[in-house]
Image: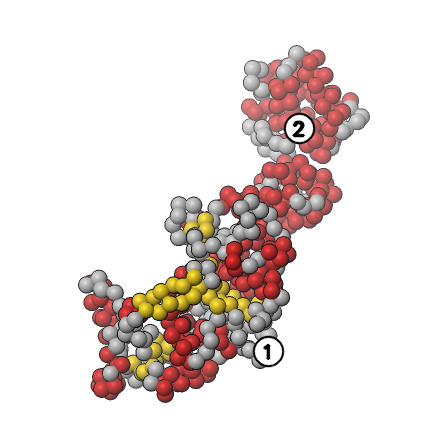
């Protein structure tokens, strides 16, 4: 049997991480098996539709490099891949169940259903619809209440139903807790249950891999497959994703839309690697995987049932790892747009475009400290600004006064002007000798020089930084420091 899996998002907003984790696992499995990865848009709940979200979902997939074999726009015998374009298929299926007596029309008004729900809630009773219209005589009486009825499925009144899940094994459901759920709504749109089952069957889906929150739907789907005489795909429910506090993952945990991660400067390779480990692992220790390696190793057997923890620091760590893997020129190219951005980039006084060769020389100095590309403008600004601003008090090292600091900076300026070899080792030798001549601790002299040339008390290694900044810039900044202190 060939593997055909689908990612079936509802266009109800930007794709969040849990959602894209489902996409990733399906993609990995399809690629592992040489199967087919399908994107199907489940837009049957018109009240929750958010314009632009289909585009955002497809953009997130493309950014992560999760290419689909079939999806919106594909011309195959399985399409269309947008549920609102498949309404006739769902109606036909609902009609079949109505004709078989496995479903019935329900005329109950929204008011009646709301009142029923409120009464149940007040009594803290479970259960949903009371099955009034399941009785044909009652239905006949109710007809007047509602000109546009819904179609409901006749759920067995009792018994248990075992559903097999690849991750959890047999899961038993008490049928008496299921009500007669809606198949077709009064607007002619199907419910999630009907559309999902019809499409998974017609699209010949072999494995349904989706988040655990959909597990309660499994018995309803099982009943529908049986009623249609269709074989049910293998179910694979992915574990819940929780925040470090073990609560359901939410915005509060910094788990934003996947596109927000992109906009904060996470690398797609890093986010992908991180997401792959939310519920799957190869072994106890391996953590770093490329997309291709993941596809090679991915099997559903290694998906766990227990909840996965979304740890933002871990994601930052992954991002740092992938940033460190980049070559100087490659990272410079990745950083340039962030630095040049009009709003979030370097101060507007810094001319654009920035010098790529200069940036490539800076990259080795900052790579270790860089966690997100979006941090670069703040971290690197002193390399580009003509006059990095700082508090002149910082120029006076501990244990010294302002005149002493000025004398030290003057000597540092003179040493800079005299130096012909502007390499880091030569600068270090010169400044160590200078500290000794002035009777200063190296920490004192280097600290004052660091503030003068970078405007900061903490910066990458001083002499490497000076080497990259160049003689002219450093001398100019030392001159200004002498005046400022
Ligand atoms: N439309 C559902 C969602 O938004 C799909 C659930 C499923 O994969 O069956 O997640």
Residue found at x 38% / y 63%: 171
**Extreme-right residue of the structure:** 420
Give 347 or 44, whichever is nearer the viewer: 44
Label 2 sits on residue: 462
Give 245 or 326, whichever is nearer the viewer: 245
Residue 211's tag is none
Q: Residues within 10 Å of mark 2 (few under 14, many from 20)?
A: many
In percent of width and height, residue 27 lies at 57, 62
| In the image: residue 150, left or right of residue 168 | left
Give 441 or 107, whichever is nearer the viewer: 107
Residue found at x 44% / y 55%: 305
64 lies above or below 176 = above
Label 1 sits on residue: 76
Query: Mark 2 to mark 1: distance in Å?
Result: 62 Å
438 lies above or below 64 = above
Q: Nearer the viewer, mark 2 or mark 1?
A: 1
In percent of width and height, residue 48 lies at 41, 67
Label 1 CB sits under 8 Å from any ligand 1 atom:
no
Q: Are marks 2 and 1 in contact (CB under 8 Å)?
A: no
Residue found at x 50% / y 43%: 313
């Amino acid at each position: 049997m060939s593997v055909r899996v689908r990612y079936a998002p509802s266009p109800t907003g930007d794709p969040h991480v849990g959602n894209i984790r489902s996409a990733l696992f399906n993609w990995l499995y399809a690629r592992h098996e040489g199967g087919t990865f399908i994107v199907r848009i489940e837009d049957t709940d018109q009240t929750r539709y958010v314009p632009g979200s289909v585009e955002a979902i497809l953009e997130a997939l493309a950014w992560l490099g999760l290419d689909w074999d079939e999806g919106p726009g594909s011309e195959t015998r399985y399409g269309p891949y947008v549920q609102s374009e498949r309404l006739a298929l769902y109606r036909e299926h609902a009609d079949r169940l109505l004709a078989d007596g496995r479903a019935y029309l329900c005329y109950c008004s929204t008011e009646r259903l709301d009142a029923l729900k409120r009464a149940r809630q007040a009594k803290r009773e479970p259960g949903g619809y009371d099955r009034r219209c399941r009785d044909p005589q009652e239905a006949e009486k109710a007809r007047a209440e509602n000109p546009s009825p819904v179609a409901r499925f006749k759920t067995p009144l009792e018994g248990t139903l075992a559903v097999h899940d690849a991750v959890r094994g047999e899961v038993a459901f008490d049928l008496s807790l299921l009500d007669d759920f809606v198949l077709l709504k009064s607007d002619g749109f199907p419910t999630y249950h009907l559309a999902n089952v019809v499409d998974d069957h017609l699209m010949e889906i072999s494995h349904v891999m989706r988040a655990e929150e959909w597990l309660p739907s499994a018995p309803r789907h099982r009943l529908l497959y049986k009623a249609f005489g269709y074989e049910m795909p293998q179910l694979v429910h992915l574990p819940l994703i929780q925040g470090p506090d073990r609560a359901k993952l939410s915005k509060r945990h910094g788990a934003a839309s996947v596109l927000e991660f992109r906009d904060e400067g996470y690398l797609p390779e890093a986010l992908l690697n991180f997401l792959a480990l939310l519920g799957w692992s190869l072994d106890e220790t391996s953590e770093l995987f490329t997309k291709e390696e993941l596809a090679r190793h991915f099997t559903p057997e290694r998906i766990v049932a227990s909840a996965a923890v979304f740890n933002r620091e871990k994601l930052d760590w992954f991002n740092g790892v992938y940033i460190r893997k980049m070559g100087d020129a490659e990272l410079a190219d990745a950083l340039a747009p962030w630095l040049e951005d009009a709003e979030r980039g370097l101060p507007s006084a810094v001319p654009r475009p920035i010098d790529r060769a200069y940036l490539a020389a800076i990259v080795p100095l900052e790579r270790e400290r860089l966690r997100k590309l979006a941090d670069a403008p703040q971290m690197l600004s002193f390399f580009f600004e003509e006059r990095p601003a700082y508090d002149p008090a910082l120029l006076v090292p501990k244990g010294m006064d302002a005149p002493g600091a000025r004398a030290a900076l003057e000597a540092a300026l003179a040493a800079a002007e005299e130096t012909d070899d502007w390499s880091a080792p030569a600068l270090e030798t010169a400044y160590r000798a200078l500290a000794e001549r002035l009777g200063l601790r190296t920490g004192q002299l280097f600290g004052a020089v660091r503030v003068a040339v970078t405007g900061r008390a903490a910066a990458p290694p001083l002499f490497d930084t000076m080497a990259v900044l160049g003689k002219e810039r450093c001398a100019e900044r030392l001159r200004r420091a002498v005046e400022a202190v």
